[in-house]
Image (cartoon, grey):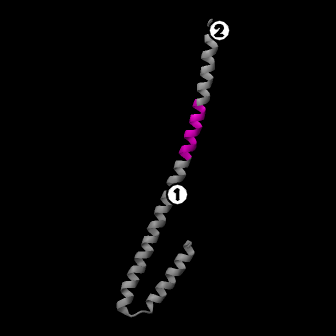
């Protein structure tokens, strides 16, 4: 169920609740309001998780780039050291 469907169904539910007797209506209106608040809170939490995952993905890409650069530097330095060792013999 997407966001629009949820709000449409919740709107339908609230319309139906408004037709109930007072004693039932008050309790169900409160429950519908709580449901809407929980849904919004859950949506914010999911959005925060998505942002955290995006940040984590970017961090991993930087770490992989740094690892590859370090490996290239190590290979280059090993070759330099090996070249010095051979020229000293």
Q: Main secondary structure of the magenta part?
A: helix
Q: Position of residue 28 (x, y in %)?
A: 39, 84
Q: Which region shows up in magenta?
A: 58-70
Q: Is residue 69 left or right of residue 32?
A: right
Q: Position of residue 80 (x, y in %)?
A: 62, 17
Q: Position of residue 49 (x, y in %)?
A: 49, 57
Q: Are marks 1 and 2 in contact (CB under 8 Å)?
A: no
Badge 1: few (under 14), some or many (20 or more) residues near its Cα, within 10 Å?
A: few
Which of 83/23 is in front?
A: 83
Q: Any magenta on residue 68?
A: yes
- For image coordinates 49% across by 62% down, the residue present is 46
Q: Any magenta on residue 69?
A: yes
Residue with the most extreme top position: 89
* Relative height, residue 89 to residue 57 (above, below): above
Task: Report which quarter residue 34 is drawn in.
Answer: bottom left
Q: Quadrant of the C terminus?
A: top right
Q: Position of residue 81 (x, y in %)?
A: 60, 16
Residue under numbered circle 1: 50
Q: CA distance from mark 1 to mark 2?
A: 56 Å
Residue under numbered circle 2: 87
* Relative height, residue 54 to residue 88 (above, below): below
């Amino acid at each position: 169920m997407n966001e629009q469907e949820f709000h449409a169904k919740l709107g339908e539910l609230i319309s139906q609740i408004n037709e109930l007797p007072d004693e039932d209506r008050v309790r169900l209106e409160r429950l519908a309001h709580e449901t809407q608040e929980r849904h919004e809170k859950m949506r914010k939490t999911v959005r925060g998780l998505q942002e955290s995952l995006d940040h984590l993905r970017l961090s991993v890409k930087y770490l992989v780039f740094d690892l590859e650069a370090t490996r290239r530097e190590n290979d280059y330095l090993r070759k330099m050291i090996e070249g010095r060792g051979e020229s000293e013999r």
